[in-house]
Image (cartoon, helix red, strand yellow):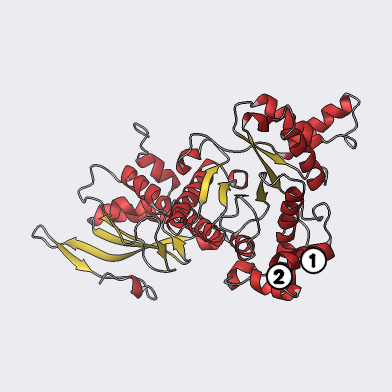
Amino acid sequence: MTNGVPGPDFVAARTDKYFAKTAEIVAAHGDARATYAVFLRADVVVAVDRAVEFLREVYPADARIPLEVTRVAPEGATLTAGLPMLYVRGSLAALSPIETLLLQRIGFPCLAAHNAFSMCVALPNAAFIAMEARHTTGDDMHLACSYGAAVGSRAAQLAGAKGFVGTSTDIAAPLFGTPRGLGTMPHSLIGYAKARMLAAGRDPEAESATLEAAKLYAAQFPDEESYTVLNDYDGREVSDALAVCRWFHGPDGPARAGKRLAFRLDTHGGRHLEGLDWEESVRTLLSWTDCKTPAEIARRALAGSEFEEAGGMSADELRDKLLFGTGVTAAAAVHFRKALDAAGFDEAQIVVSSGFDTLKCRVFGNLSVPVDVVGTGSFLPSRLSRTYATADIVRYELPDGSGGWKAFDLVKAGREFLKLE
């Protein structure tokens, strides 16, 4: 690597061997000018700027055939499966080893962009925070998918959605136009606060460990304008949230200094949110939607969803997972909002997390579930095979002996649709 630019050795160590051998053969028998069509077999939002930048960096500066990149679809455009998103033309000897590394940088961001766009459009009035970092394999995947989410978000914002306002890590924050990552507390901070209470002889059953964690956080970060409190640690989402609200808006609470408060619902999928069971969840959504039956709620909730979004779940499973069952369901968010409002804390915002993919966002959007922010990493591609980008050569050009090129439009059987017009 020279001056931060990957060199030939970087590419050679990472490319598929058959491409490296092809480059040797072409170099020995006479180079050709090749045109590649790059595409995916899934519907995508185009997010390839970073991949093209990488291609320009690694393409040999001394190559006798210059590199040309033709963008068929602009960054952020939606593209149907199988249609080329760009054409790359240059030296076959130079491009052949680069193909593997180029394709690695296309699939994940384009699928993440498509998913993020779909999620934001499905729930347009909520702001989103990218929280996929811990589910990725490291910086490469994290930044590729965060970049995709940022591109998808910008496309959704053009359609009127709030979109993504940030991410949970500093390294990816610039992709979303923010200087640093966002976030307040994980479950471990509440566990720590609870351990301190027990060590001091205090009773966490009589006092709230969630409130204790909120106080620790506020004391440590007094300059922050808003606090988001995670409130499911002890299974007392409503009770603990109200305790935090009373302190927050009390005589010495942060509200006096103009701070804002939010709660993040992250109830485990093995239980209902405090105050709910199946029957109460049904009653909650019947009242919220003015529907007559649970089936009517389900039809409204799933309106506009695609078969693929269900991920193989049955109708009953979808109803359990998203509407009336355990975890962060539509009923849970509505019930929690009503509890805050009834106690006079209607200014407190609701942040939801836990499996907010396109389908879950669509359900919440269709039912106008009152959530302000969604923390999610579910724009990550759920099926690896959908991220497989492909590049097929569609034109070979050989020297014509007079300083020009003789073109041959060739492609493997079944890919004739990629040929240049």
Q: Tell which of 361 and 371 is nearer to you.
A: 371
Q: Earlier in the sequence, mark 2 or mark 1?
A: 1
Q: Quadrant of residue 202?
A: top right
Residue 230 lies, with reference to residue 277, above or below; the image says above
Numbered mark located on residue 188 in the image: none
* Residue 168 at x, y percent in the picture: 58, 40
Q: Is residue 328 visible?
A: no
Which mark lies nearer to you, 2 or 1? 2
In this rendering, would 143 be left or right of 197?
left
In this rendering, would 191 be left or right of 150?
right
Q: Amino acid at mark 1?
A: Arg
Q: Amino acid at mark 2?
A: Asp
Residue 171 lies, with reference to residue 288, above or below; the image says above
Q: Quadrant of the C terminus?
A: bottom left
Q: Quadrant of residue 218?
A: top right
- At x 74% / y 45%, what residue is drawn? 344
* Residue 216 at x, y percent in the picture: 73, 28
Identify the element where label 2 is drawn: loop
* Residue 367 at x, y percent in the picture: 64, 65
How far apart are the two marked residues, 2 and 1, measured between alpha carbons?
A: 10 Å
Q: Is residue 316 visible?
A: yes
User: Tag 2: Cα neighbours inside 10 Å, few (<14), some, or many (≥20)?
Assistant: few
Q: Quadrant of residue 283?
A: bottom right
- At x 51% / y 52%, what residue is drawn? 163
Give the labeled residue for mark 1.
283
* Residue 76 at x, y percent in the picture: 40, 56
Q: Tell which of 117 and 388 is nearer to you.
A: 117
Q: Quadrant of the N terminus?
A: top left
User: Tag 1: Cα neighbours inside 10 Å, few (<14), some, or many (≥20)?
Assistant: some
Numbered mark located on residue 290 in the image: 2
Q: Check the image and name the residue furthest to the left.
A: 402
Q: Tell which of 337 and 62 is nearer to you.
A: 337
